[in-house]
Every structure is written in C-alpha cells, then in structure tokens.
Image (tube, helix red, strand yellow):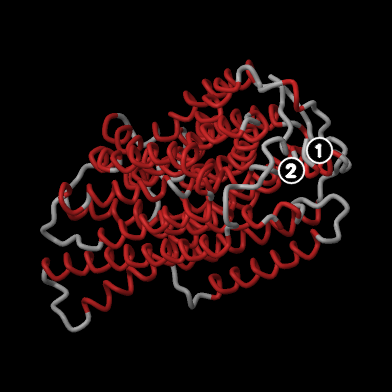
Amino acid sequence: MSEKTLADASRPGAATTDHTAGPAPRRWWILAVVAVAQLMVVLDATIVNIALPSAQTDLGFSDGNRQWIVTAYALAFASLLLLGGRIADLFGRKPAFLVGVVGFAAASALGGAANGFTMLVAARALQGAFGALLAPAALSLLNTTFTDARERARAFSVYGAIAGAGGAVGLLLGGVLTDALDWRWTLYVNVAIAVVAFAGGWLLLGNHRDAAHAKLDVPGTVLVAAGLFGLVYGFSNAETHDWDSPLTWGFLIAGGVLLVAFAWWQTRAAHPLLPLRILLDRDRAASFLAVLITGAGMFGVFLFLTYYLQLNLGFSPTKTGVAFLPMVGALMVTAQAGTTLLLPRLGPKAVIPLGFAIATAGMAWLTGIGVGSHYLGAVLPQLIVIGVGLGLVMPPAMQLATGGVAAEDAGVASATVNAMQQVGGSIGTALLNTLASSAATDYLSGRDATSPLVRAQATIESYTTAFWWSAVLFGAGAVIAFLCYRRGVPRQDADAAPVIHM
C-alpha cells in the first residue's frame, strides 16, 4: 500500500476496507447497471428537445415558456449535484442510487402524464433533482468497484462513451418515440429503463458508507447550490433573452460571488462539502477543466447540427438521430482505445490534447456545409472525426478526475465531474446561441431578408459560426490540457479508492 493510501486511511471517516481481498466478483454486472442508469440521466438532457414542438401543441404553452422545459431540468441537476454526491458518501451509494432511480422514474411518469405547462416543468425539475442524486452515486460506484487499473480503464471507457454519446442517443430515441408513438413516451421510457436499473442495483450492490463519521456541510451546500443555480440560470437567460438583461448579468455575478464564498468556506469547514484536496491534484484539476470545455463545445455539434439536418436537409426526427450514430460508434471505439491502450502508455499530456486537436479539426471541417450540401459528403466524415476526438477526451478525463481519491470523497468527486459537464453545457448553449444569432443578423443586414435563398444562407452563417466557435473551444482545450497535465503516465494510485466487496 502506498504512502498516499496510508495517509488517506488515517483521516477521520476514511474507509478501512482491506485492499488485498480482490476485486468485486460481480463488477461487470455492476458496470452494466451503472451504464443503464447513467444513460437514462444523460439522454434526458436531449430526448425531450425533439418532442418539444409536439408537447407545445398538445399543452398549449408559448414559445417563451418552451425553454423552461429544458432549463428546469438543467437548473435542478446542476444546483444539487454536489449535495447528491455527498449524500452518497454519507449514507451509502446503494440507497442513493436506488432512491435516485425510483425518484427519476416517478418524476418521468409525472411528466408523461402532465396536463399542463406547470406540471411538466415541475416534473422536469424533479427529474433533475433525482438525477443529481443518481449520477454521482453511479460514477462513484465505478471508482470504488473497479480497483485494478486496467479493469478500471475499461469500465471508464464504457461510462465515458455513454456520457459523451448519450446526447446523440437521446436525439435518436426522442425522434423514434415522437414519430412512432407520442411525445409523452420520451418521458415514459425512463420508467422501463429504471425498472432494469433498480432491479440490478437491488440485487448486485452492497451498502457501504465511506464517510459515515462525517457531517453534512450545510452552509457549503447552500452556497454551492445557490452559486451553481445562479450560473446556469444566468446563461439560460442569456440564451432566451439577452446578455444585457439584468436577469442575465445579475444572476451570473451573484453565482460567481457565491461560488467564491463557497471556496472560501471550504477552507474553514470542519466537514467540507468539497474537500480542497480533491481539486489540488494537478491531473484531476486539468480533467475537470477538460470535461467543462468538452461540455461547452459538444453543444455546437448536437444543437446546431440538429437544426441543420432537420430544417435545411429535411431530415425527420428519427433520421436525425440515426445521422449521429456514426459519431457515437467512433466515440465508443476510441474511448476503449484511449483509456486502455493510449493513456497507460502515453499519459494524459499526450492523449487528451490529441483528442481535443482531432475534435478541433472535425469542427473546423464541418464549417464547410452549405445550402446545397449533402449528408454523406459534408456531415458524415466530419462527425466521425469529431467522435474520434471526443472519445480520446471524455473517458480518460473522467477516469483521471475520479481516480485516486479516497473512498469517502468518491461521491463528491464524481458529482464535481457531472457539475462541470452540466455547467459547460449551459455556457456552450448560451454562448453559441448568441454568436449564431448575431451572425445571422449581420448576414441579413443590407440584404433582401424576404428572399428564401438569403434567409437560408443566413441560417447557414449562424450554424457555421457556432461550429467555428466550438472549434475554438476545443482548440483552447488542447492548449489548456497540454499545459496543465503532468508529463508521463498517470501517477494516481490504483489502490487509493478502497474496493467495495459485492
């Protein structure tokens, strides 16, 4: 056992599980259960988007209110993630996982049965709240179940692929369900997924509390929840209104101040919600930044390419989802290669910047779309390149962000990863929407705005602008990752997170 592990074990509340007893015998089944639960959470960020027009027609809410169906989920999810992660550490990952699954399913059923706008928004907020409990519990279960370095890499390649491709899967599933059945089934489908996840979790998971002697940091919880709410709400308001709106900059400033206050409080709290030791490891901090940047840049792919495929190429919702599958396949293949082959040999300083560079090239290539372009020539090859790049970034970054932490911190470290991805997505959506809208407005200035061809070209200008800025984000990610990661292979100890024997 390394000195680092001994030091971790000596802290109050540290787990004392014997590391030498071997890996959890049912660990691959546990991975399957965790993957199913994570897919449910991730795809719900996009599955409802395709169904929004149908839901709006059915329930009769305005265009201005439509965004709240998406924003309510994002606000609750992002705000409560760190609390959810700490609850898993304090009270056990199995109960946190099972309660999260049941609550998510119940909220989904409520949303599917919604008879009005208010009921649907409330259901989406409840989905986000229970997702904030479920997601960090699921990720921390991987970190504490897989203690062999090679097996952990394989497990995180699966998890990271789901985290990266879940949005595209949501688009596909949302399109199929909306076309074949009804928009309500984009929510009801979670009940079926939850039954599988709950049964597997109940049978396979053991109850283990690694921070049982710690206490919940209530001031820290309030500060970080309010701070994350302010940031996500501010960026969401910028997307639907304007950056000059007092609600936009007011919430952004308030969120930033509250998060600074949270960081200050964590240095003084007896039982901090987010122990700063989690952030002080150089590779882990770089991984959090990589996840944040990837979350922001990926929306340039999913959001604007969805618009292009449906509005310009005339794809149906189902066909749009199918169009993203090659990217998903490329991402899953390179996720496996990146975590199991390249990362242990080359280290993150080579692998993750390389992934960002490839994704940058793919996004820049995608800016070549035009009014008369075709999917096979102008979209498909670019999507495959982007998938290859993201597969070298997301799974390795998630593995490094959660690996090497003491078991009592596994839940909150996992929650931080999810929070980075969610906040990054909110930033990317707001920023890219604003830039795209400005590009379209600038193109129409001085031209005949009534001409269908001019208006079509204006939309192309908006999409390509978003793609260029996504390329800039990925390019910045390559530079930041190269500067921040240590040289050589990861130095985190494979035994640092004690095994939970199932």
Q: CA distance from mark 1 to mark 2?
A: 8 Å
Kindly identify which residue carries mark 2.
409
Quarter of the N terminus within the rendering:
top right
**Which of 108/12 is in front?**
12
Q: Earlier in the sequence, mark 1 or mark 2?
A: 1
Asked which quadrant contains residue 67, the reply is bottom left
The answer to which image quadrant residue 97 occupies is top right
Q: Residues within 10 Å of mark 2 (few under 14, many from 20)?
A: many
Residue at 27 percent of width and 34 percent of height: 179
Decide: is 367 above or below 213: below
Residue assigned mark 1: 211
On the image, the x and y values in percent for residue 175 come to 30, 38
Badge 2 element: helix
Q: Give the quarter of the image for residue 452.
A: bottom left
Query: Is residue 25 positioned above or below 476 on the image?
Result: above
The label number, if any, that marks residue 293 in the structure image: none
